[in-house]
Amino acid sequence: MKSDSALQELAFQALDAFQIEIPSWGFANTGTRFGKFLQPAAASTLEEKFSDAGQVNKLTGVTPTLAMHVLWDLPKGIADAETVRELENKYGVTSGSINPNLFQDQEFKFGSLCNPSSEIRERAVAHMLDSVLIARKLGSRDVSLWLPDGSNYPGTQSIRKRIEWLEEALQRTHEQLGPNQRLLVEYKPFEPAFYHTDIADWGMAAHLAAKAGPKARVLVDTGHHYAAQNIEQIVAWLLHTDMLGGFHFNDRRYADDDLTLGSIDPYQIFRIFHEIQLSGRGALRQIAFMIDQSHNLKGKMEAMVQTVATGQELWLKAAMVDREQLEHLQNRCELVAAEELFRGAFWQDVRPLLKEWRRARGLPEDPLAALAESGYVQRITSERGGKLAAVTSYA
Ligand code: LRH
Ligand code: MN
């Protein structure tokens, strides 16, 4: 049994290593195809998104970067870089991953990088290359690609040709990357395409990343799996093959529901964090932790702060696993003892340790309570409420 001081030291080490990136679109009014419930406090400008991210970082201390979607946040492209610099200095968070938008232009109806028209593919590749240049200008390490490309009916598209076009497009994108930059390839089994999706699973993403070049890795969005899939096993394989580049964390009951982390299956995230922690601190630097959620009903600031706190709790629970003893029991196939040890860490209430760490780091013990006390949401509600009607785009 570890002493209290040894336990605290282990906990503090684990929590000091945990950081998670915030998505700008998590603060904006988002919805489903059946509609959008508008929130007066929602962010609709890049400054408001930086302000909200700055507030979350002030309350939690672990969200220093903001992920941006090019067409949603940087409509002027690289010309927006100066504005971003000012916002970074004003709100104390820096530019995180840069996400190209290849899913809203009318001409991408039959695909973007995989479109049968070489002119349309060329314009899609141009957007990828622009996204890389924007990332270089902002000093962002990761260009994070999610591609909606696919088809809705058998026989209507050549799956093989589309693979070749994709390989070529990602190789050209990889060539444009700067020395410390990476290309993250996100997979998704379906939606918006409902017959085939060109990057549908981890194997396809890993092949495309490996073919693109040494700076490409796979991004695992926890919501992009069939319910029966064992996500932590996919993570173990990507770690084993050194192809894991990062995560989009969220939760789901059915499909890509984009619900808040740990709201449906917290044990799932615990099992993923365990696989990552088995790979040690070194690997952690290569793995980008990002949130990718759309807060359609919960207050967006509350949902974001709750998500970060839940991530810290599940990360700390995974750090509580006595990995040496677990390996011993696994080797001896002592199933019940191994499960009791593993699950026992998950049952542990780590919130007192988390409060100690926050106190020691000069952070509010309870960031959600601190958010409520700050009056921040009330302030932005009155500042932004009047603009509600103006909201047009998806996010
Ligand atoms: C696609 C996705 C992708 C983002 C988008 C907001 O489902 O997960 O990562 O671009 O959500
Ligand atoms: Mn995602």
Image (cartoon, grey):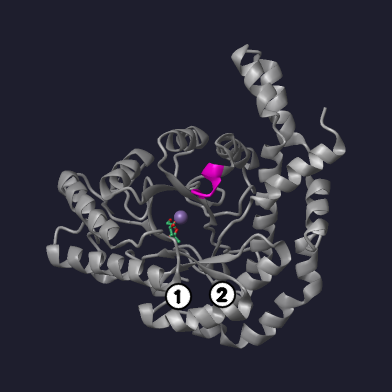
Q: Which residues are magenta?
A: 282-287
The answer to whether residue 48 is seen in the rendering is no
Q: Position of residue 193 (x, y in %)?
A: 32, 52
Q: Residue at x 48, y 62 (%)?
A: 32
Residue linked to disc 1: 73
Give ligand 1's quarter of the image: bottom left
- Residue 328 forms part of the magenta stretch: no
Q: Is residue 252 left or right of residue 325?
A: left
Q: Is residue 283 magenta?
A: yes
Where residue 49 is drawn, which disc sits there?
A: 2
Residue at figure coordinates x 56%, y 86% from the top left: 387
Quadrant that contains the N terminus: top right
CB atoms of marks 2 and 1 within 8 Å: yes
For label 2, count other residues whose C-alpha is less than 10 Å away and answer few (under 14), some (14-19) or many (20+). many
In this image, 355 relative to 269: left or right?
right
Q: Looking at numbered disc 1 in the image, what kind of residue is underneath it? A: Asp
